[in-house]
Image (cartoon, rainbow, N blue to C red):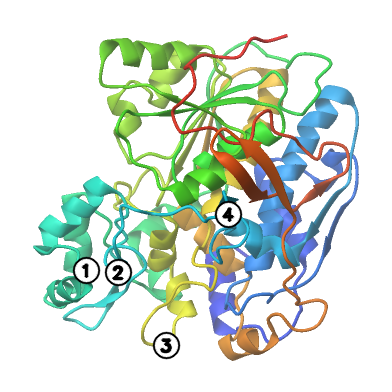
Amino acid sequence: MDLTDKIKKAIAAPATDDAFDVHAATDEVLAGIGLKPGDTGGRITFEGADPVVPSTLRLGAASGIALVAKSAAVAALWKDRTGRGQDIHMDLRVGPHRLCPFYDGKWELLNGYVGGTPSLPNQAFANSFYRTADDRWMMPFNIYPNIKVAAQRLLGVGEVPEDVAAAIAKWNARELEQAGAEAGCVMPMVRTPAEILEEAQYRQVLSGLPLVEITRIGDSDPEPLPAGPTAPFDGVRALGMGHIIAGAGAGRALALHGADVLNLWRPYELEHDVTYLSTSVGVRSATVSPYTREGLERIHTLQAGADVFYANRRPGFLDSIGLSEEESIARRPGLIHATVSLNGRSGPWKDYLGFDQTAGALTGLLHLEGDGDKPALPPITVVNDYLVSWFMTAGIAEALRRRAVDGGSYRVHVSLSRVALWILSLGIFEKSYAERIAGTGEPHAYPDPEVFSAETPLGHYQGVTDQVRMSDTPGAYRQILVPRGSQRAEWLPTG
């Protein structure tokens, strides 16, 4: 079945039992990346079953499959470099804790406190839904200053939720969505799963988009990675302009397995503490302005010395500072250029701005989580951000394997909405069944995640491990957490 058929089957017959072949679903994801389970040199095993949280979505399986796909790609690279295979094991029951480690305020803590979002005085432009004049629902998810100001200007309001509701109630939904796109803010209309299948963006782009796109985009000589590695990404330099989760999380994943990861921030750029404390574990952090000649030259020089460049920035931003695919691979032949988009790189929605929850609104996931009228977020508040970063990391690992043998520069691209559609394709639960079964009995229990703690320059940090078990390369970080933008914008010595 193709993606459309899988989604139609899922919404036509919501599940009311445990029947789900997690191995088959994993094999399909691996095949799309160019891998087979045997490429790890060991066994892949799972335990537990959805629902473990009261959601219509298979959040345990989605998390577990994405973590295993990332781990399998890393294991395959390790086997190429050392000849050593390994087993991979995932307990699906803890997957949602890793997908959103901060939603319940217990597991990611700095000096005993959860990271905050102090730039958001309330939820007026965050996790809120508003009804329109034509009886649809909007989710204006504008959690950064520039896009929030754009939304406020469009609606003619401040940050009082009742004022936002009154303003949105005057609009028809599709007109407001288009106006939001033109204004440069996040303003999606919540769709049903059936409705997204009829949209031009789905028919023209998303329906045929690979879950993880890995495309050779330039020629270069083969680049075998250095011999005698101590970790799968040992010797790999990864330059990032990641933020929030979907892009920044790839930096954390690369750092866990030995890469020198340097993420760049612009002066005066805002980042929410809650996400920085999650995704920046293991990542070096520097401040460089792309708006000065000296700063831009520094960024370009760093990229010329990198193996990987990753980013999740608004459409057109990378092009505007000379970091497009074409300019990047001309500067550094053999570069792996990895990016995240909301809706894909082409089509009528290619310039839409948005986040994890935006993809959930556009593709019908938030409709499914609602009560049949008003949509709702999943119980863990997110849909797929970290899934995107794990899939991106899997694509990067596979691209490095190909470069080692065949040479070439590679595009790795993952779409938030495409990943949301993949979650739909796994099947959904009948809502009352999920609410009744989640957290009951051994298969559906929701155990606490494994955590670790460390003293850092920011103070005492507690965080979650990756939860997936790799027998030969469990992973370790060079550093845990540093103040954002506090380190030198330079590569660590090699050798």
Report, in whole angstroms, how far the alpha carbon at label 1 lies from the one at label 4: 44 Å
- For the residues labelled 1 and 4, say whether their Cβ atoms are less than 8 Å apart: no
Q: On the image, numbered disc 4 is attached to which residue?
A: 112
Q: Which numbered disc covers residue 189?
A: 2
Q: Nearer the viewer, residue 278 or 328?
A: 278
Residue 415 visible at all: no
Which SS class for mark 2? loop
Which SS class for mark 4? loop
Q: Which numbered disc covers residue 256?
A: none
Q: On the image, numbered disc 3 is attached to which residue?
A: 372
Q: Is residue 278 above or below residue 457?
A: below
Q: Is residue 143 above or below residue 197?
A: above
Q: Amino acid at mark 4?
A: Gly
Earlier along the polypeptide chain: callout 2 or callout 4? 4
Q: On the image, numbered disc 1 is attached to which residue?
A: 174
| Mark 1 surroundings: few (<14), some (14-19) or many (≥20) residues within 10 A | some
Earlier along the polypeptide chain: callout 3 or callout 1? 1
